[in-house]
Amino acid sequence: MALSRRDFLERSGAALVGWGLAEAIALQQATRLLAEPAGRRQALLVGINAYSSACVDGANQNAALTGCLNDVALLRDLLVDRLGFAAADVHVLTDTAATRSQWQAALQELADTTRASDGLWLHFSGYGGQLASDGTALLVPVDGELVAAAAQPIRDWAEPTLQAWLRALPTERAIGTIDAGIAPIAPGWLPQRSRPQATLGCLDPEEVLWQQALRKTARSRGSGGLWLRATTPDRQALELSQAGFTAGAWTYLLAQHLWNGLPPKTLWFELAQVAAAVESQVGKQQQPIGERLIRSAIDMPRGFDWLTIAQPAACGSIVAIDPQANTWDVALAGLPAIVLESVAAGSILETTLEPNLEPTLKPTLETTDADLPQLARVVSSHGWRAIAQPLSPDELAWVIPGQGLRERWRTIPRNLSLTVALDPTFERIERIDATSAFDAIPNMTVLAAGTKAIDVWFGRSGSARRDNKATDPNAASGGYRLFSAGQSWRSSAGGEGGEALKGEALKTVVQRSIPQLQAALARKLLRATVNRAAGFPLRLSLAAADAPDRPIAQISTPTAIASPVVAPVAIGTPTLPASGRPCLTLENTGDQPLSLLVLQLDPTGHLWADTAADRRWLQPNDRQSLSWASPGGRGMGAIWVVASWEPLDRVRSVLPVPEEGDGWLPLSQPLSIARMLLDELHQLSNLSTDPARPTAPDLYALHCGRWATLELAFRWV
């Protein structure tokens, strides 16, 4: 039964102590937190799709969202199947169950059961808003109806109240993640999660009292937590189509990155790469942020040891086993959307034996069969869920639900295409002409938004958001333009303001866009090779050349030997000055040499390669530092490093040869290079004698133990 609001306030605001005693208690608690192991771990995940117009916008009869329940499911998979939370300790409220009173009761239950050594994760996906009177950020429950008068109490939660609740818990092992917008922003081409107008009304007086009591409790305990938001208060929180499903742009990338490893010393680098990945997709109109509640300074790794995982690298897990059909139901939330799109082409998965599985769950065998990877071929997929068929009927006996999975063979279609979505405001003739123009270009697919992940939009520049016009004066000049998946400014392929908007003029613009489209497809192919879970002892660190010991970004494979690092001081997209020189450090912490290929993306969308002959190999237990002149300009950039045990000679043989300078040269045919890289990885994979190798001629079959590709994204400023 739900508590009354007054009971809730009385129970949760009790036990305040004086400042002198509080400081002593806080010091003792901080010391104990660093020494004692993490205790129970709980989570409350709230997601709402089924909003009515009365909650969001009386003028919009279709206020429902589509990705919030998927956000909750993705995070539940992460917490239970990857981070080892007990399923019974992950509490979920969705749609009609996510009323204010039920949400309130769940918060009280968590507050009552959380202890100093426990960990807690609070998440919300849904609509946010902004109080018209003072700009307070709001989170909208399913019954949070709009009001007509400024003095009328509302049922929305004030975000500062939930922050105070998190701070008042007796543990520092607490994280709040919010995938909702705040600022009133009119709807655009994509669904976004904030009310389109400021919210009238005032906070419930009882909530104000509770918030004050929580703040006093937080001051007395000295606790804090991490508060992460999908976007800054003045920007959008977008929903994006992925591989057959919709999810919050930020939540999906957060879940995917955290699947790939969470050592506490690199948590901040992981979060920064999530922010960079969001900005790479949707531009500056969504910028994830994070803060440490109470303390302004970041204290690493204090408070986040409870997120440490000891399991082997994995991309997913077995959800259920069907002995009748001889299949596994699997979740693959650790795979990027580009890989999920083609996983059902015949990718091969293998099991990992999780070290934290209870001994009673492991079958008692006379042989070591249960300790060997069990193989299964993906036969169908829906979003990040798939059905896999064991390659041998006997293998069904040696697996259990919850067991980790990783890729053995990745399949990528040789004719992988760039997905183009059209401006929804196009007239019928424009849509027909645009579809015809893109159909004439190889490997271009025009699809309706919402069916799969969008690579680029094609639309009128006049349809661009005011955000784009503010950052690029050409965006308002008329004509047609290419835009990113989030409708941010992508290129200047369009015509001048006086160019006609119909007929052959549109086709001419598409033809002029071919170099940009091919470069975008090349980047997509490169991202299809990202394979961080491979057993290559490789680590990358990116810094400014004048401060090489303070990396702004770092990423590694799971087998790279950890070393102390200085964590960044903020969570957000890593930045480098456009007028300076970057420094990329590559480390091989293993005992075999690695063949390397290093590529970078500049702010204009062009690809460059490190062509220096003396950097073909990275020797065992060695490091190389690459420094080069900034390519100029401001915007998003990225670095890809491909590593292999065998020489990557075929791609390197066609790279331009530097006459002088630092070895970085632009690629005039980036799409050819990207395809050649996939073909070379395919040929290297053929060296394997693995009988499970997919053999379809229209696929690249890549053995995930034969190469690793790491990606670092950042922004030139």
Image (spheres, helix red, strand yellow):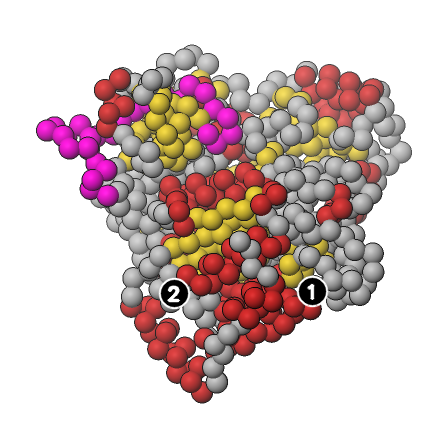
Q: Determine the secondary structure under disc 1.
A: loop
Residue at the image position 80 percent from the left and 27 percent from the top:
426
Instruction: For marks 2 and 1, give the CA distance.
Output: 29 Å
Left or right position of 691 against 186:
left
- State the mark number for residue 461: none
Q: Amino acid at mark 1?
A: Asp
Q: Is residue 345 above or below residue 246?
A: above
- State the mark number for residue 115: 2
Q: Position of residue 464 (x, y in %)?
A: 77, 40
Q: Amino acid at mark 2?
A: Arg
Between 695 and 441, the one lying in front of the other is 695
Mark 1, Cα crowd under 10 Å, few <14 / some 14-19 / many 20+, is: some
Residue at the image position 59 percent from the left and 35 percent from the top:
246
Was residue 384 drawn as part of the magenta stretch in this picture? yes
Name the front one of labels 2 and 1.
1
Residue range (magenta): 358-385
Between 586 and 89, the one lying in front of the other is 89
Indicate the quadrant where residue 501 lies. top right
Was residue 582 drawn as part of the magenta stretch in this picture? no
Between 648 and 418, the one lying in front of the other is 418
Q: Determine the secondary structure under disc 2.
A: loop
Left or right position of 555 against 242:
left
**Nearer-N-terminus badge (2/1):** 2
- State the mark number for residue 204: 1
